[in-house]
Image (cartoon, helix red, strand yellow):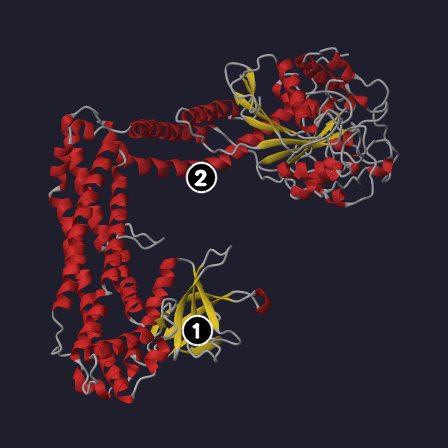
Amino acid sequence: MGNRGMEDLIPLINKLQDAFSSIGQSCNLDLPQIAVVGGQSAGKSSVLENFVGRDFLPRGSGIVTRRPLILQLCFNKAEYAEFLHCKGRKFVDFEEVRAEIEAETDRITGSNKGISPIPINLRVYSPNVLNLTLIDLPGMTKVAVGDQPLDIEHQIRDMLLQFITKESCLILAVTPANQDLANSDALKIAKEVDPQGLRTIGVITKLDLMDEGTDAKDILENKLLPLRRGYIGVVNRSQKDIDGRKDIRAALAAERKFFLSHPGYRHMAERMGTPHLQKQLNQQLTNHIRDTLPGLRSKLQSQVLSLEKEVEEYKNFRPDDPTRKTKALLQMVQQFGVDFEKRIEGSGDQVDTAELSGGAKINRIFHERFPFELVKIVFDEKELRREISHAIKNVHGVRTGLFTPDLAFEAIVKKQIIKLKEPCIKCIDLVIQELINTVRQCTNKLGSYPRLREETERIVTTYVREREGKTKDQVMLLIDIELSYINTNHEDFIGFANAQQRNTHQNKKRAIPNQVIRKGWLTINISIMKGGSKEYWFILTAESLSWYKDEEEKEKKYMLPLDNLKLRDVEKGFMSTKHVFGVFNTESSRNVYKDLRQIELACDTQEDVDSWKASFLRAGVYPEKDQGCVVDTAPSETFSMDPQLERQVETIRNLVDSYIGIVNKSIRDLMPKTIMHLMINSAKDFIHSELLAYLYSSGDQNSLMEESADQAQRRDEMLRMYHALKEALHIIGDITTTTVTVPVPPPVNDSWMQEASPTPQRRPPAAAAPPPSRPPAVSGPRPGPPLNPSPAFGGPPIPSRPGPPPINAFGSNNHQDPFSAPPLIPSRPARIPPGVPR
């Protein structure tokens, strides 16, 4: 009888896994792995084979296991094995499994004792196993042999740590009985990753190979060199038995007979052997499952609640019902219209926090990108003055003019107004692109019906493209209207009288002094030789650009006045992912920052660069105009003017500046209104009132509402998942009412594992035993066998086992029995069966 409730727990866990396997998912119970660590030829592989009940692992002397073998045991009615690297092939003969392991090991490591951390994955299906993951690891060694690398010891150690550091990994520290336990590498490495001893079980092998007259009784009683979970002794098959094909079941019977007949172990035979080791692992499995189930139950309940609403729609689903298709079409079109309007007008629900989209992006185009494009195209002082000078001279012809000609003013103004067409068309194109992106995002919800999604996207996009042409025509009409009549009586126009008295600082109008226009993070690109690029918190006001160490604004790094500053585009570096623009001083002799004539400011996206440029425009810092196309002879023609011509150029320059400001203001106001009316609002009205009619006329309703194969599969999977989750919750309810757990043993004094001095393992030397007072390591709830008082402290030594022992030596209730327990240790009844095998 193993752990109480285990007989019910394992089948229920298998049902739980089957319920999830039916929907192609895992229940994520995170069942523990069992890693066997120890020196070479300590018997690790034999311990694993005893669990499986099959002889399938490679055998031999020296290092045999040269790659980790991850052995997954799966409860199944049929018995066979599968390798991950041989998908689809089932191994029924376990001799073929051994041959495949050897061949796969040699394929990676070679045939001369080399090792590799690449694991071999083997899955064994059998009705005789529990759902566990066992790991057979290479034995620890200190000397390289064959073509092994010189650091073989460190390679194996790193490989072991890769597995045993996991909290769900149970460590079986295997040490042969004919080796000094205090020098056990397995216990040492287990102590490093499991200092509390919660996951470590000591396994003593080869008890039948100890020298005559010695035994490991004190070790197995957890009296000498104690572990928190104690030690379990096992007797594996010898090499002779393996070569003779001795059956594992017969070997287990021989192991049982050994412990019952050996005078040093018969009183603890029930706690020794492979069956008891399996019970301990079963108990660990039970505890782990019990710890995992509450979290799993909460996860399943939340998943069931999230599926309830969708499953309710699918419960009475009939794919061929025409009324269902009509209702679904109406609902889909209506939802599409609502989603489109929410994305354009803004909404409190389903807010995208990752990036700007829909109406927010269109707003940025209207009020940041478009004004920036206007200023960038219109403003060019040198070229404008040259054009005014040519216009004045051409109007006067051969005569020398006495007055400033208004025809020159109109010619220059109309030429500047025509330049507005390009940024206006660009603005419309940007809005069109964002509208089409918004339509595609809204049609994602129609993915269940691919034909409906395709038709909806095509119809709406076609309509938007139609409105694009009308909108561009209307905007061009607005510009033509501006060109048709130059209204010099406009209330904001300065007139000739004021223009003659006004200087050229009109362009330097700025916002209210000290008004903060923008704050944000920017990176200053500086070469590595001068300190490298750094990120600062920038504040742009109407008069200066300042940057601080961080957003607390306590440690100011620098303040740069905006006078004579301009912007220019900078190509980003070869390996750089950031977008860059430059700020420089128009006075060539002045540095902007330290010894830099130009500072390069970097942003994460081009949108951020455009936004910062628009903010600089509000502060009166304008972009540099490319002068590559200007003829070099221009200065001599432009500035070799007589004083009268210079006054006329200045007057017209001020008049043009004033009137273009009026036109820009009008265009900036009318462009968003025109686009909203002719394109965006019209598209919303079309979706709400006409889209459904276009869909009905585009083709057969049945084909339009034909469900995608993915959606049908998703619906079936959802229904199966819902029922599997309900079944799993019911199964978990059964588990929690039918199982119990056993508390973890109390801590023991395991400081011996940190000492380097070896301690003798065999019993005859008297100094090795502890005093009769019993250390705390032996006084825990673990039921222990009767212990010998140590001969090292008073009293004559008591022989470990006198001659031929009488049959009733352990069966009598004589309190004078030298092997009875002292008062501190609870006595236990003898477990020896009536007949002891001879």
Q: Which residue is mark 2?
A: 295
* Residue at the (15%, 33%) spot, across then down: 698
- Image mark count: 2
Percent x, y for residue 341?
Answer: 20, 50
The kind of residue tagged 1 is Phe
Which element type, helix, strand or loop, lies under badge 2?
helix
Q: Is residue 228 visible?
A: no
The disc placed on residue 776 is none
Is 273 placed above or below 747 here? Answer: above
Closer to the chain start, of discs 2 and 1, is: 2
* Extreme residue in the front direction: 398
Percent x, y for residue 2?
Answer: 57, 24
Percent x, y for residue 455?
Answer: 21, 36
Which element type, helix, strand or loop, lies under badge 1?
strand
* Residue at the (53%, 30%) spot, across then down: 286
Percent x, y for residue 330?
Answer: 15, 37
Q: Quadrant of residue 409?
A: bottom left
Q: Which residue is mark 1?
A: 584
**The N terminus: image quadrant:** top right
Query: Could you say which is closer to the camera, residue 337 or residue 5?
Result: 337
The kind of residue tagged 2 is Gly
> Mark 2 and 1 residues: CB-CB less than 8 Å, in contact?
no
